[in-house]
Every structure is written in C-alpha cells, then in structure tokens.
Image: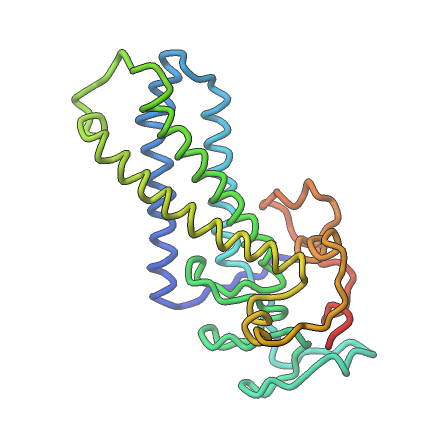
Amino acid sequence: MGLRIHFVVDPHGWCCMGLIVFVWLYNIVIIPKIVLFPHYEEGHIPGILIIFFYGIAMFCLVALVRASITDPGRLPENPKIPHGEREFWELCNKCNLMRPKRSHHCSRCGHCVRRMDHHCPWINNCVGEDNHWLFLQLCFYTELLTCYALMFSFCHYYYFLPLKKRNLDLFVVRHELAIMRLAAFMGITMLVGITGLFYTQLIGIITDTTSIEKMSNCCEEISRPRKPWQQTFSEVFGTRWKILWFIPFRQRQPLRVPYHFANHV
C-alpha cells in the first residue's frame, strides 16, 4: 500500500503547525547547547543520553511530518462498495456520496474520512483511519521529548555540578536564565496539553470509540461489543507486532477487517 500524500490549504493550520515546529526547534537547539554538550564535555553525563535525545527528537519530527501529509482516509468520488457490505454504508448528506459507517464529513477539509477521529489544527490534517497511528506516535514522542527536556533542565540547575567552563561571549550563555525559563514554560505547557490529549486518545482506542462518536453520543451509551485492547490497537497500527507500533518510518498495512470495523449499532 503506497503512501498517499494529503496537503490541506489552511492558513490557521499552518500557523498552529508552525508553532509546534518552533517549539521543537527551540528545544532541539537550546537544550543540547546549554545543558547536554557542556555537561558531557565535563564528564557529568554519558554520550548515550545525547544520542537518545536526538533519537527521540527525530522520531517526533518524522511522526509530525507524516501525520500532517498522510492521507487520513479520504473517500474517492465513486467508492467501490465491497460485496456483501452495502448495509454497512450510508449516504453523506453533505457531499451526497456513499461512505462506510463510522466515516465523517470534515467541514474544514471538505471530504468524508474513514473512521475520522477529529480534525487537528496542530498537524493541519484530519486524524482518520490511515494516519491515526502516526498521530498517536506524535503524541507519545512529543510527551517523551518534553519530559526529557524538562528533566535535564531541572538537573542542570539542581543536580549536576556547576559548569567550570562558560563562554560568556555566546548569546545563549549570557542570557541562559531567560532562555531556559522560556524553554521550561513551553515545556510545561506542552506537557499538560499533550498528556490530556494522549490520554483521551488511548481511552478512545481501548473503548473503540472516536472523538466524534463520543461527542455525538455524549448522552447515550454506544452499544458496540467491546473488543480486546490488543485488537483495537492492532487495527489502528495495522500490525499485531507491538514493537512496530513505535516505528514511524514504516508503511501501515491495514488488517483484513471490513470498512465498518465490525458490529455496528
């Protein structure tokens, strides 16, 4: 299954995604420059921690880029309904096209998306069947990178020995306190937001319920048979190999499950 590129022309989404990239760049430059490399040179930390930091940052960036440009599962203008599944399809009252149940019409993108969870301005894309796994990886690696940066910021001031060599000619060294305070503020803000988002995403997958379904059925129980969490996660990530759930470089191969994801109301 080839990668289908999807690019949303939305200035609001560009601004949101640009802010995420700015925070990523800020931390990927400042934390190593002020904390990691100086303490490594003075023997306070091993080099593997620097490699680990850049590894997490790379995985985070790859997940961000791929989640933002991957087709979330747009339906074609004339979809082919699989034989025997017509009863699990419905007519969209906005674009007048047949779509599998659990699809949703995104008013911002103007398309119906299979098993759409929500439209996320932070990636300037919908989160649907084909890129939900990348969005989960983005949440995971963003939280991991944020915790890593905050931990080293704390250790820099309260745990590590003071640095013996400090080049005061460098701008980042002269204004270190203000720069690190800004990094800590952005990190804490990011951590609080991404933790709540990641938690709701995990609960949604465990209960096999999308964010749109939760909002549209907030006052009633969704009477869908509960599936094991391993099955729901395998359907999202396209593989039963759990180690592959953490790798953003691969191609997702959907499991052999019908469009309606079985047992509809």
Q: Quick one: 248 or 45, which is closer to the camera? A: 45
Query: Which residue of the protein is positioned furthest toward the right in this rendering?
Result: 84
Name the one closer to the observer, 137 or 112.
137
Q: Which residue is drawn at 36% across and 37% down?
A: 27
From the top left corner, tell me how far across and down residue 219 is, in percent. Answer: 58, 76
Q: Position of residue 123 (x, y in %)?
A: 45, 58
Identify whether 59 is placed above or below 127.
Answer: above
Q: Quadrant of residue 18?
A: bottom left
Q: On the picture, is 204 further left or further right than 9?
A: right
Q: In which quarter of the image is the C terminus?
A: bottom right
Q: How many marks?
A: 0
The location of residue 100, given as percent across then percent down, is: 68, 76
- Of residues 214 and 182, the one drawn nearer to the viewer in this rendering: 214
Q: Where is residue 137 in the image (x, y as percent from the top left)?
A: 56, 48
- Give the residue displayed 43% in from the left and 40% down from the top: 146
Looking at the rendering, in which quadrant would you find the N terminus? bottom right
201 is higher (above) or lower (below) than 74: above
Question: What's the residue at 40%, 17% (across, down)?
Answer: 40
Q: Quadrant of residue 220?
A: bottom right
Q: Is residue 227 left or right of residue 70?
A: right
Residue occupying the point 38% across, 63% down: 13
Structure colour scheme = rainbow
